[in-house]
Image (cartoon, grey):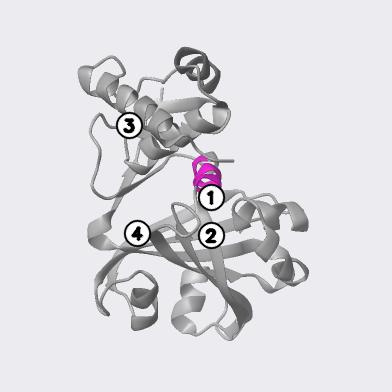
């Protein structure tokens, strides 16, 4: 389906002006897709494209089953990843494009094993991939995904997976994800990662390392490498009542 570029651009610009004028302030919900379709006399596809652009600009966060909430009234020059729950990670996977680059098995050395939370010497599956805003678009991050040996029967089908790996593997293994532990740190990326992210080797990177844990331990662990100056991580926390 072809996107009516002038139309989605008009909707994008109108919503942006409303946010900057205070009509839609930070933490306010935008009208629903149906309401926007009616107001602008546009297709749902065109409205979704306008909303996707707002997400890409770091102004709006889309929440599955809830709608679109304003997180900034000004476009941001770098990619903003907002996270407050597993559903946000799920939506992130749906709103972006993933290209699987390679699969294989590796033996975890002491450092990797400590990160993953298992014993050194275990053989885990390693899936490497590149995530971008859209197919053929600018890369957001390079991903190393380490998958537990007990999920071996399902690894080869990950290339057809729609949505995040953790959700697919949890469903196939019957293991519920009980918690996600995340560490964010800075490091110099290696030449392979730098090549895929179109930057120089030893460029400063921000890495988000996540462990998805079930009753049986870590099911999948991923290193998500971003160019540091192009990435901003946002987390919202509320006071317990």
In this rendering, the answer to whether 1 lies above or below 183 is: above
Image x and y of residue 76, in percent: 24, 42
Residue 93's tag is 1
In this rendering, the answer to whether 109 lies above or below 30 is: below
Image x and y of residue 174, in percent: 77, 53
Task: Identify the element where label 2 is drawn.
Answer: strand
Magenta span: 88-95
Task: Identify the element where label 3 is drawn.
Answer: loop
Q: Earlier in the sequence, mark 2 or mark 4?
A: 2
Q: Residues within 10 Å of mark 3 (few under 14, many from 20)?
A: many
Q: Nearer the viewer, residue 174 or 96?
A: 96
Residue at which label 3 appears = 71
Task: Identify the element where label 1 is drawn.
Answer: helix
Alpha carbon of mark 3 to alpha carbon of mark 4: how far? 21 Å
Q: Earlier in the sequence, mark 3 or mark 2?
A: 3
Q: Nearer the viewer, residue 36 or 160?
A: 36
**Residue occupying image coordinates x 65% and y 70%:** 148
Alpha carbon of mark 3 to alpha carbon of mark 2: how far? 24 Å
Alpha carbon of mark 1 to alpha carbon of mark 2: how far? 8 Å
Assess whether mark 2 and mark 1 are in contact (beta carbons under 8 angstroms).
yes
Task: Identify the element where label 4 is drawn.
Answer: strand
Image x and y of residue 171, in percent: 73, 51
Residue 98's tag is 2
Alpha carbon of mark 4 to alpha carbon of mark 1: how far? 19 Å
Alpha carbon of mark 1 to alpha carbon of mark 3: how far? 19 Å
Q: Residues within 10 Å of mark 4 (few under 14, many from 20)?
A: few
């Amino acid at each position: 389906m072809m996107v009516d570029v002038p139309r989605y651009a008009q909707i994008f610009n109108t919503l942006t002006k409303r946010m900057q004028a205070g009509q839609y302030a930070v933490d306010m919900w935008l009208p629903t897709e149906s309401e926007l379709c009616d107001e602008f006399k546009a297709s749902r596809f065109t409205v979704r494209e306008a909303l996707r652009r707002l997400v890409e600009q770091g102004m709006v966060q889309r929440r599955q089953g809830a709608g679109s909430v304003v997180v900034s009234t000004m476009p941001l020059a770098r990619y903003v990843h907002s996270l407050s729950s597993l559903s946000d990670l799920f939506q992130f996977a749906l709103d972006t494009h993933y290209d699987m680059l390679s699969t294989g098995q590796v033996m975890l050395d002491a450092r990797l094993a400590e990160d993953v939370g298992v014993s050194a010497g275990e053989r885990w599956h390693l899936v490497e991939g590149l995530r971008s805003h859209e197919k053929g678009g600018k890369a957001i991050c390079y991903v190393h995904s380490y998958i537990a040996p007990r999920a071996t029967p399902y690894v080869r089908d990950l290339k057809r997976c729609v949505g995040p790996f953790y959700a697919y593997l949890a469903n196939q293994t019957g293991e519920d994800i009980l918690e996600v532990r995340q560490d964010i740190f800075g490091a110099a990326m290696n030449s392979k990662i730098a090549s895929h992210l179109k930057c120089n080797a030893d460029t400063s990177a921000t890495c988000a390392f996540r462990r998805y844990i079930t009753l049986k331990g870590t099911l999948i662990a991923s290193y998500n490498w971003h160019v540091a100056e192009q990435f901003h991580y946002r987390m919202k926390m509320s006071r317990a009542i």
